[in-house]
Amino acid sequence: MRKITILIPAVVIAIALLLSSVFVVDERQRALVLQFGQIRQVIEEPGLAFKIPFIQEVVYYDDRILSLDTAPIEVTPSDDRRLVVDAFARYRIVDAEQFRLAVGVGGLREAERLLEDILNPQIRVVLGSDGVTSNTILSSERAELMERITEQARLRALPLGLDVLDVRLKQTALPGQNLRATFERMEAERQREATDERARGEEAAQRVRAQADRTVVELVSEAAREAEIIRGEADGERNRIFAEAFGANPDFFEFYRSMTAYERALQGRNSSMVMTPDSEFFEFFANPAGGSSAAPAGE
């Protein structure tokens, strides 16, 4: 009975020691066996593994592809048009031992901080290099820029035990003050275009009005010329008729001209004329028969 009493605790202790010495590595993980903070074993294959209980500990690291979103940063391309870029990276822990030595107990959080310190300067260097403009960054050509950033970040991340697989720009935008300046510049450009359009419209209207005024002047001038021609022809015809009438009967023609002169001179109710009674103007009033020149006509 005493042996059984002693055996049971021993078995329990043995089982406890066995369980504490066994651990499982998942296929999505890598493991490091540490003893007093020093790396004693690197386990890369999944399955059961053993460690010394209470002396050694196991640290697990993810063996899958991981993602890191960087904080937005400002870059200045060669055209001095500042942009705010927000990138993300895909990376993987390829050397667990080197990774542990580089980040210590900080783990993934410290690794992402160090990786971001690598990515941000490379993004600034590549996007700010000669020949790279804001239009290049916003066009399909930025895929080549991302490859350059990836290659340079990969070289600098290898000492951390990391392999940078890909870097991509998640968002590209203008800074707040640049955005306002861009809007103001666009507004000024639209106002300039509107002013140009109005000026062109006013110029076209002036041409139309000038053409219309010219047409009016030409039509009026042509009409006035034709009127003068017609008036001249009428005056000529009138003078011809007068000449014929004078030639046919000079006394009658003289009498007609005198009557016309009386009619034009004595218009209105208050017409007044001052002249001598023997004036030739009143020849036909003094001698209705026409004076000395009327006698031949009476004959």
Image (tube, rainbow, N blue to C red):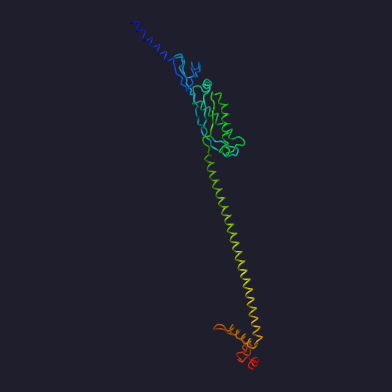
Q: Is residue 195 above or below residue 37?
A: below
The image quadrant where one finds the C terminus is bottom right
Residue closer to the observer: 295 or 122: 295
Q: Position of residue 147 (x, y in %)?
A: 57, 31
User: Does residue 2 appear to the left or right of 244 in the view shown?
Assistant: left
Outermost residue on the top side: it is 2
The image quadrant where one finds the N terminus is top left
Residue 258 lies in quadrant: bottom right
Residue 14 lies in quadrant: top left
Q: Position of residue 213 (x, y in %)?
A: 60, 64
Residue closer to the observer: 98 or 289: 289
Q: Is residue 251 above or below residue 164?
A: below
Outermost residue on the left side: it is 1
Q: Is residue 199 above or below residue 260?
A: above
Residue closer to the observer: 140 or 4: 140
User: Does residue 227 appear to the left or right of 95 in the view shown?
Assistant: right
User: Does residue 215 appear to the left or right of 111 in the view shown?
Assistant: right
Q: Is residue 78 above or below residue 215?
A: above
Q: Position of residue 91 (x, y in %)?
A: 52, 27
Q: How many marks?
A: 0
Q: Position of residue 225 (x, y in %)?
A: 63, 71
Outermost residue on the bottom side: it is 299
